Image (cartoon, rainbow, N blue to C red):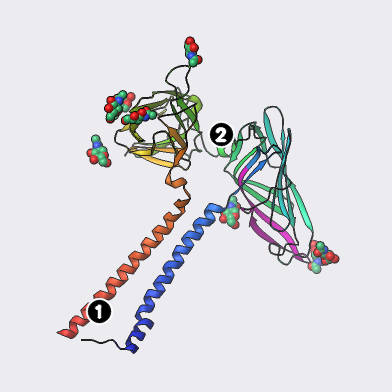
Amino acid sequence: MHIWKVAEVERCFRVKCFGYQVIMFWCAFVVFFLALGNELHLSHATEVSVNNTENKLCLYANLMVNFSVAYEVGVNKSESVLFVLPENVTTEGSICNNTTSTLKLGFGDGHSWAVEFTKDNKTYQVDSIVFTYNLNDSSVFTNSTSNETKSVTAKPRITNVGVDTYYSCKSENVQRVESVTQTLYDVTLQAFVTNGSKSDTDTVCTADLTSTTVAPTTTVTTTAAPTSTPTPTLPTPTTGNYSIAPDFNSTACLMATFGLRIGFKQGDKVETINLVPSATEVGGACGVNSSILILTSDTITIMFTFSNDSKKFHLHALNVTVKPATGVAVVAANTNMSIWVAAVGSSYMCNKEQTLTVTETLTLYTFKLRVQPFGVEKGEFATAVECFMDSDLSFLVPIAVGVALCFLIILVLISYLIGRRKSRTGYQSV
Ligand SMILES: *[C@@H]1O[C@H](CO)[C@@H](O)[C@H](O)[C@H]1NC(C)=O
Ligand SMILES: *[C@@H]1O[C@H](CO)[C@@H](O)[C@H](O)[C@H]1NC(C)=O
Ligand SMILES: *[C@@H]1O[C@H](CO)[C@@H](O)[C@H](O)[C@H]1NC(C)=O
Ligand SMILES: *[C@@H]1O[C@H](CO)[C@@H](O)[C@H](O)[C@H]1NC(C)=O
Ligand SMILES: *[C@@H]1O[C@H](CO)[C@@H](O)[C@H](O)[C@H]1NC(C)=O
Ligand SMILES: *[C@@H]1O[C@H](CO)[C@@H](O)[C@H](O)[C@H]1NC(C)=O
Ligand SMILES: *[C@@H]1O[C@H](CO)[C@@H](O)[C@H](O)[C@H]1NC(C)=O
Ligand SMILES: *[C@@H]1O[C@H](CO)[C@@H](O)[C@H](O)[C@H]1NC(C)=O
């Protein structure tokens, strides 16, 4: 029988158990950085709303801006600093008028970023962006020789935005003026908001459109389609609004809005195609126990079957036919699905991109989804049940993965140590 002496226990803590401590530390470290990385990733965008004098929304922005500013730190010596438009900004000084508006974002110690909008009958545009920075802010401009506040005026090409639509541009828009470089990206901007609510339709910047090729969904007679070039990544599909009414002059009984992309196999290649809402016909029917939505375009026919199992509904079946401009048609059906679950009388929502594997050869991707297949009243969506990916808790996923990994490592280590002790005591007892 082995009796542990105090000294031995102490030695264990210093030698063996030290290993555990290192691992624990390491784990905490990993988890912390996973969380931090995720947090940074999540919280980078700047989102603001400005209300007019009647307290109705009149300006909305959700965007990211990176600044690079060169400034003097000595005679003939300059330095440049990189920083981002912070998440927390003030909107003081923003103005909404009938044909002109200013979105002024103040941040840090006396810096500001102001966007000037003007409007004519059908469109509005950004006239200028005035970036003002305070060189006296030593937390940003360390060792600056000047303590002035400087301004630069950039003229980005943000024009022809339809009134009552928002401007959307994921691509980078780089503005270089004097010693300042501003990079705008992931931009959503709406000025002259009508009726106090942000529009559902967007005006997409040309950079987002031309960097990728839009799928030819409207013409089936195209013969000279490029077959050898790899499929370019498509832009996010346009969000369509679809509804079914039981008869001609009554309000909707089924409503759905989403952007839809379909990925399908052609031989070994995977092709993708977007559904174009403006070239899509809507059909279907509402029932007590099941409702159907059928969308038909030149290239895509898709049937959604929803089931009402008394208290909840779900998407039960999907039947998709894709007839690409070249190649063979692909048909895929799955009649045993149980997704998009919500209580009857509410709607189901998922703003994030969602992937639905229908069959091995065909996959659906939905964007900004909201559906209500039963119990629609007054042509409006009822309260929504949101998918997990939309929820604030989804940031826990990488943390959970980190924790699980750590547990695994600890387990392996413990079993290794136990194994070693066993084999050692084994030798001694023989
Ligand atoms: C903007 O700055 C952040 C942080 O400095 C960086 O991670 C990101 O890549 C930059 N984005 C662009 C478009 O320059
Ligand atoms: C600074 O640069 C100017 C011209 O670029 C030059 O004439 C001057 O001598 C420089 N001064 C110093 C201190 O290097
Ligand atoms: C700016 O710097 C000048 C000279 O370096 C100084 O006289 C002035 O008081 C400073 N102004 C502020 C607001 O710090
Ligand atoms: C529905 O349309 C029919 C004819 O198309 C009309 O007679 C009837 O009054 C309408 N009902 C309502 C509620 O508008
Ligand atoms: C709906 O389902 C219930 C029970 O599942 C059944 O009693 C009822 O007859 C069905 N209604 C219709 C219209 O099919
Ligand atoms: C859903 O089904 C239940 C019975 O299965 C029925 O009582 C209820 O009216 C249905 N809901 C709708 C909105 O059709
Ligand atoms: C799917 O639709 C096609 C064409 O409309 C039809 O031939 C096929 O039977 C359907 N499959 C299922 C499982 O409903
Ligand atoms: C449907 O799925 C369930 C469980 O996922 C399975 O038990 C059942 O056999 C499936 N039915 C069909 C027709 O594939």
Q: In which quarter of the image is residue 143?
A: bottom right
Position of residue 17 relative to residue 94, above or below, is below
Identify which residue, 389 or 289, lies in the foreground. 289
Residue 142: image location, x then y, percent? 70, 66
Which residue type carries mark 1?
A: Arg
Which residue type carries mark 2?
A: Asp
Residue 139: image location, x then y, percent? 69, 64
* Mark 1: few/some/many CA within 10 Å (<14, 14-19, 20+): few
Range shown magenta: 61-90
Identify which residue, 94 or 146, lies in the foreground. 94
Name the residue rendered at 33%, 88% in the picture: 6
Q: Which mark is residue 421?
A: 1
Q: Quadrant of the C terminus?
A: bottom left
Residue 60: image location, x then y, percent? 63, 41
Task: State the predominant SS element of the stretch in magenta.
Answer: strand
Q: Is label 2 within 8 A of ligand 6 (CB to nearest ligand atom)?
A: no
Element assignment for label 1: helix
**Res 393 seen here:** yes
Measured in 3D between alpha carbons, the distance from the residue under mark 1 to the one under mark 2, in whole angstroms, is 66 Å
Q: Would residue 365 be found to the left or right of residue 172 on screen? A: left
Residue under circle 2? 200
Element assignment for label 2: loop
- Specify whether residue 18 is painted magenta: no
Question: Is the Cβ of the residue at disc 1 closer than 8 Å to that at disc 2?
Answer: no
Identify which residue, 229 or 152, lies in the foreground. 152
* Mark 2: few/some/many CA within 10 Å (<14, 14-19, 20+): few
